[in-house]
Image (tube, rainbow, N blue to C red):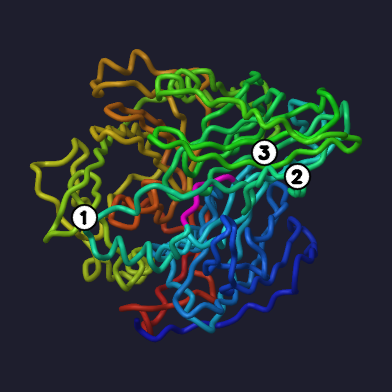
């Protein structure tokens, strides 16, 4: 790797707060990223810790707060953190992906500085380099509503973060080696973790959370795993869905909820049962051998263990599809801004471009690769955003290697995959999944309207089935086997934004692309200048900075 230039922005340690006059509050963190031995499934393995913690620290913020995190990389390899679901308005410099940022070298540090602008909701962060996510380094990131803007439910007694995910006892380096060898996938997980552990059920388990009888609690649940959809449920309690990836939802009650990789939601649970212990359960979906993770929820005056009878999960993906259709945007609630969510009438905007994306798997030179429209992405040594900003894009990648209509032929090409998008255009993206396994797609920098998921193949006539009134605005959508999904959004956030399969091995082996959204005005009104402390690497290392944007 080329030598990297960097400077350090000084931060206060731990989690301190300060306010600059006329600005929103600042929160400062110092994070030390290290290896450490963890044994979440009883097998000692190398984990990635943040300040000695697995999972990492939770970030608790409020709309428009400024977050400043000084990350010290004490690993023996380059490292980056990505803030999944945070839109980084005008600021893809902070997105923390190999296409936007040079990785932090071993023994060095980098300071992320971003604002959770005009957002509320439940999100998480994780390592975006190599297969580091398989070792930890992830944590919860919540954005609360400002006090001036009411939420559409009473304040809960407490607010809990629940990180669920599949887990492998093989190390992240072993999993990476399996994928680099290119002969097979990482196969099925050995376990499911809830906040980094799973209950043994032998009476020795400490509770993950406690509840006072009669009180209502908010649980923010995110699937931070590598590849497996999960079903999430509470023993003996129903859940009221209230938020999904930054949007208030219509408040339906559920006995269980499917959560696909990269997705988050918030539910309210009332402690209205016999006072004792209960299990919270996350179990795998759509794989033959079901793996179950459990945690203890304890009533504060509880007497007695949790029943060994675990509530059963649903079967098949038709159930999951029908559940998706019950999710609705709460049109009368205000999210980050005072105006109701329903005041944005996305269904009446004319579509200016339709992009059809097909996922595929194939072998190239005898090695397994995954692709979008026939192109399997690789990260160049010079991050795409830096190459574009410094005016040397043609030396690093080609724009628009894929067609909006899907793959042309069956040949798979390995190359950086970047598409051009016109600033402020309203677009339709169709995800077609012709494979026999489920997909989960995530778009950085935006939320989109998830207007339809249906079996079969998409055609223009299918638009008649779109939900053009109250589809949930979110950032991750699943596509069931031999099915399609449609999303609508406006490309109004200038920057270089990643669209990827959330299935980690698919992403690692090429199933991702970047969308370049350039403002023709090259104005600070639309995009921030490159931060002073940005790490430079590859071809841009040592180059003079371009002329900065102005108002």
Q: Position of residue 509 (x, y in %)?
A: 29, 56
Q: What kind of element bears circle 1?
A: strand
Q: Which of marks 1 and 3 is in front?
A: 1
Q: Is residue 113 left or right of residue 521?
A: right
Q: Position of residue 242 (x, y in %)?
A: 67, 28
Q: Earlier in the sequence, mark 1 or mark 3?
A: 3
Judging depth in this view, the residue of 347 and 140 nearest the camera is 140
Q: Is residue 385 left or right of residue 328?
A: left
Q: Mark 2 points at which residue?
A: 203
Q: Mark 1 points at which residue?
A: 368
- The residue lying at 77 percent from left, 49 percent from top is 206
Q: Where is residue 507 in the image (x, y as percent from the top left)?
A: 34, 53
Within 10 Å of disc 1 (Cα), the crowding (few <14, some 14-19, many 20+) is some
Q: Name the residue under label 3.
A: 336
Q: What kind of element bears circle 3?
A: loop
Q: Which quadrant is the N terminus positioned in? A: bottom left
């Amino acid at each position: 790797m080329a030598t990297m230039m960097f400077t350090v922005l000084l931060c206060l340690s731990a989690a301190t707060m300060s306010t600059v006059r006329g600005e929103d509050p600042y929160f400062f963190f110092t994070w030390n990223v290290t290896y450490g031995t963890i044994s979440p499934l009883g097998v000692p393995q190398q984990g990635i810790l943040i300040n000695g913690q697995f999972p990492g620290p939770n970030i608790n913020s409020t709309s428009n707060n400024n977050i400043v995190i000084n990350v010290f990389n004490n690993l023996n390899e380059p490292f980056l953190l990505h803030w999944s679901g945070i839109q980084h308005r005008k600021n893809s410099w902070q997105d923390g992906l190999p296409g936007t940022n040079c990785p932090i070298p071993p023994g060095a540090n980098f300071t992320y500085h971003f604002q959770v602008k005009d957002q509320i909701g439940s999100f998480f962060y994780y390592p975006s380099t190599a297969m580091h996510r398989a070792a930890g380094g992830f944590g919860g990131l919540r954005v609360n509503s400002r006090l001036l803007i009411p939420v559409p439910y009473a304040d809960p007694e407490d607010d809990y973060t629940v990180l669920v995910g599949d887990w492998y006892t093989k190390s992240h380096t072993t999993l990476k080696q399996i994928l680099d060898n290119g002969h097979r996938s990482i196969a099925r997980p050995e376990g499911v973790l809830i906040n980094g552990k799973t209950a043994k059920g032998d009476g020795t388990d400490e509770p993950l959370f406690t509840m006072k009888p009669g009180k209502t609690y908010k649980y923010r649940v995110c699937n931070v795993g590598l590849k497996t959809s999960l079903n999430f449920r509470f023993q003996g309690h129903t859940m009221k869905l209230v938020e999904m990836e930054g949007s208030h939802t219509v408040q339906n009650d559920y006995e269980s909820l499917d959560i696909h990789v990269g997705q988050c939601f918030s539910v309210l649970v009332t402690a209205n049962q016999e006072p004792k212990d209960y299990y919270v359960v996350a179990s795998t979906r759509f794989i033959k051998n079901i793996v179950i993770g459990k945690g203890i929820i304890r009533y504060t005056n509880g007497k007695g263990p949790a029943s060994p009878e675990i509530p059963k999960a649903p079967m098949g993906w038709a159930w999951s599809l029908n559940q998706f259709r019950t999710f609705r945007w709460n049109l009368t609630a205000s999210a980050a801004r005072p105006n109701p969510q329903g005041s944005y009438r996305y269904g009446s905007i004319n579509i200016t471009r339709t992009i059809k994306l097909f996922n595929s798997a194939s072998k190239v030179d005898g090695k397994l690769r995954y692709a979008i429209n026939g192109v399997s992405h690789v990260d160049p040594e010079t991050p795409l955003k830096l190459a574009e900003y410094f005016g040397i894009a043609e030396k690093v990648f080609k724009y628009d290697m894929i067609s909006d209509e899907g793959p042309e032929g069956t040949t798979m090409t390995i190359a950086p995959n970047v598409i051009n998008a016109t600033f402020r255009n309203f677009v339709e993206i169709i995800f077609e999944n012709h494979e026999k396994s489920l997909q989960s797609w995530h778009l950085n920098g935006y939320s989109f309207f998830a207007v339809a998921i249906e079996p079969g193949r998409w055609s223009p006539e299918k638009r008649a089935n779109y939900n053009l009134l109250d589809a949930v605005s979110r950032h991750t959508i699943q596509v069931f086997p031999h099915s399609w999904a449609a999303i609508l959004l406006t490309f109004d956030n200038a920057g270089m934004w990643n669209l990827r399969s959330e299935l980690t091995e698919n992403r690692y082996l090429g199933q991702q692309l970047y969308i370049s959204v350039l403002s023709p005005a090259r104005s600070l009104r639309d995009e921030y200048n490159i931060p002073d402390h940005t790490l430079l690497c590859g071809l841009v290392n040592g180059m003079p900075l371009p002329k900065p944007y102005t108002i």
